[in-house]
């Protein structure tokens, strides 16, 4: 499929980034740190959030719909800022669009967790679809099993909804976190994989419950590096010098989602409806 890669000003076109909701903004933060000149169009697919409990075929269809939206806004590449959509939809998306459209996606950060553990047990906190997906099994088989590291998992029930509501540090969220972390910490995990892009926004609460001897790892920087490599090898990087702009969209209600997005970003940016 031709996505206009021959266009001479392709380096100025934005990165298209999506998640089921606001969680992918944790990836946006890493992208902006590493690639400050790249423009970004971000879609929070709030109307369909959460993706985690949905069947894989449905998640794939939503990922394709989000990709189509971002391509219509001129995206030169796609960053799937969602572990769940990466687990279910990365391979089909790449197959559908072919090599003309670079697509970066998330792999659960099992490799760094294996490098950090001293107890020999790591925990993975991710959505049900990510825990079921082949991608997690692949990285466990590749990095944890050969090192003799045990992997315990939990689906972090209700935590995505808490971040979507902006309830980062409420008694209810702390109680949910305690419930989600108990089986992982109880099993002796001393490195936790934050396998959902919403969870880095709960890092302070997780760290408070887990204690200083437990390492927390996520895939945000990894996907930013992958994005940098994909742009660099094509000569598509934006050389600057101006900082890249960030355009925010939601498939939900901007009046509700906007304040949460602005709070998570720490910036007063407008949020538009993707359906208008
Ligand atoms: N942010 C998501 C992830 O990384 C999706 C959460 C959800 O919609 O269930 O998995």
Image (cartoon, rainbow, N blue to C red):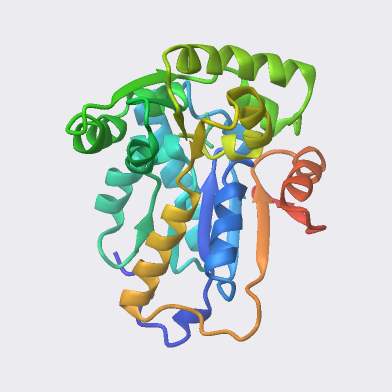
Q: Nearer the viewer, residue 119 or 64?
A: 119
* Image quarter (top left, top right, bottom left or bottom right) of the N terminus: bottom left
Q: Residue at x 79, y 57 (%)?
A: 267
Q: Is residue 180 above or below residue 77?
A: above
- Give the quarter of the image for residue 201: top right
Tell me where residue 226 appears, x and y as whole percent: 38, 60
Residue 3 visible (yes or no): no
Q: Residue at x 59, y 32 (%)?
A: 212
Q: Is residue 198 left or right of residue 59?
A: right
- Give the quarter of the image for residue 235: bottom left
Q: Is residue 74 above or below residue 123?
A: below
Q: Is residue 77 left or right of residue 234?
A: right
Q: Is residue 116 left or right of residue 144?
A: right
- Give the quarter of the image for residue 160: top right
Tell me where residue 274 appears, x and y as whole percent: 65, 50
Q: Residue at x 55, y 38 (%)?
A: 20
Number of numbered discs on residues: 0
Q: Nearer the viewer, residue 43 or 238?
A: 238
Residue 243 visible (yes or no): yes
């Amino acid at each position: 499929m031709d996505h206009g890669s021959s266009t001479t000003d392709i380096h100025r076109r934005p990165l298209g980034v999506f998640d089921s909701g606001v969680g992918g903004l944790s990836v946006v933060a890493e992208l902006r740190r590493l690639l400050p000149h790249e423009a970004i169009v971000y879609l929070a697919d709030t109307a369909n959030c959460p993706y985690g409990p949905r069947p894989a075929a449905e998640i794939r269809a939503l990922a394709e719909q989000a990709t189509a939206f971002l391509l219509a806004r001129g995206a030169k590449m796609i960053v799937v800022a969602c572990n769940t959509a990466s687990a279910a939809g990365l391979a089909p998306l790449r197959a559908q669009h072919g090599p003309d459209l670079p697509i970066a996606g998330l792999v659960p950060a099992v490799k760094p967790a294996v490098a950090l553990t001293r107890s020999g047990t790591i925990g993975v906190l991710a959505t049900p679809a990510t825990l079921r997906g082949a991608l997690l099994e692949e990285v466990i088989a590749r990095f944890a099993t050969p090192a003799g590291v045990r992997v315990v998992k939990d689906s972090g029930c209700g935590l995505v909804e808490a971040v979507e509501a902006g309830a980062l540090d409420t008694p209810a969220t702390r109680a949910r976190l305690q419930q989600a972390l108990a089986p992982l910490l109880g099993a002796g995990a001393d490195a936790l994989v934050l396998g959902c892009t919403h969870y880095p926004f709960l890092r302070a609460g997780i760290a408070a419950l887990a204690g200083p001897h437990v390492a927390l790892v996520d895939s945000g920087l990894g996907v930013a590096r992958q994005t940098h490599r994909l742009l660099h090898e094509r000569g598509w990087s934006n050389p600057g010098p101006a900082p890249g702009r960030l355009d925010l969209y939601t498939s939900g209600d901007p009046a509700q989602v906007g304040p949460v997005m602005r709070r998570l970003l720490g910036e007063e940016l407008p949020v538009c409806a993707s359906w208008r």
